[in-house]
Image: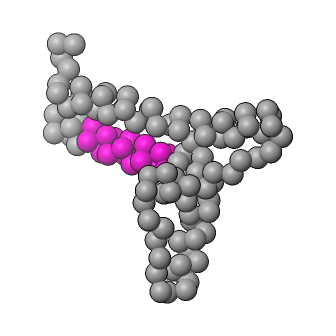
Amino acid sequence: MEGETFEDWLIAKVMMILVLPAFIGPGIFAWQCFVWLRYGYWHPVPVAAAFQNLDISYPRTEWAGVQKMIDWVLELPLSLTAWLLWVGVFASVIAFIDAHNRRKRITE
C-alpha cells in the first residue's frame, strides 16, 4: 500500500507471526484427545516433558518452598500453559501497539 509506513507493515507482520503459536496449546490438547479416543487412556503432557525434550535441565534449588513452586509449575499441563503464555504475549503486544497508535494520533 502506498500510504502504509514501515511501522504499519512491521506491526502487520508481527501480528501474523503471533497468531501461529495460538495453535500450539490447542494442538497438544487435540493430540491428547485423539490418543484418548483411539486408545482409551489420557496421555498427560506436563511442562516438564517439554523441558526434557528440549534438553533443558530440571531446575533445582535448596529452598524447599521455591522448589515446591517450581515442581507445581512444571507439572501443569503443557497445552494450557502454552496457550496462557501465548495469551499473555499477545495481550502485551496488542497493548504496545495500542499505546503506539495513541501516541501517533496525539502527535499528528
- Seen in the picture, residue 32 relative to 64 is either above or below; the reply is above
Q: Check the image and tell me how it is coloured.
A: one colour
Q: Is residue 96 covered in magenta?
A: yes
Residue at the location (20% across, 31% down)? 7
As drawn, the residue found furthest toward the top would be: 2
- Seen in the picture, residue 73 relative to 105 is either above or below; the reply is below
Q: Position of residue 56 (x, y in %)?
A: 42, 60
Residue at the location (18% across, 17% down)? 3
Q: Is residue 86 covered in magenta?
A: yes
Give the side of residue 104 with respect to residue 25, left or right.
left
Give the side of residue 12 with respect to residue 91, left or right.
left
Residue at the location (56% across, 74% down)? 69
- Seen in the picture, residue 81 relative to 21 is either above or below; the reply is below
Closer-to-camera residue (34/100): 34
Residue 58 visible to an observer of this rendering: yes
Give the side of residue 65 with respect to residue 3, left or right.
right
Q: Position of residue 26 (x, y in %)?
A: 60, 38
Closer-to-camera residue (103/77): 77
Residue 80 visible to an observer of this rendering: no
Q: Which stretch appears magenta?
A: 85-101
Q: Quadrant of the C terminus?
A: top left
Q: Position of residue 91 (x, y in %)?
A: 44, 46
Residue at the location (58% across, 77% down)? 68
Dominant secondary structure (helix, strand or loop) of the stretch shown in magenta: helix
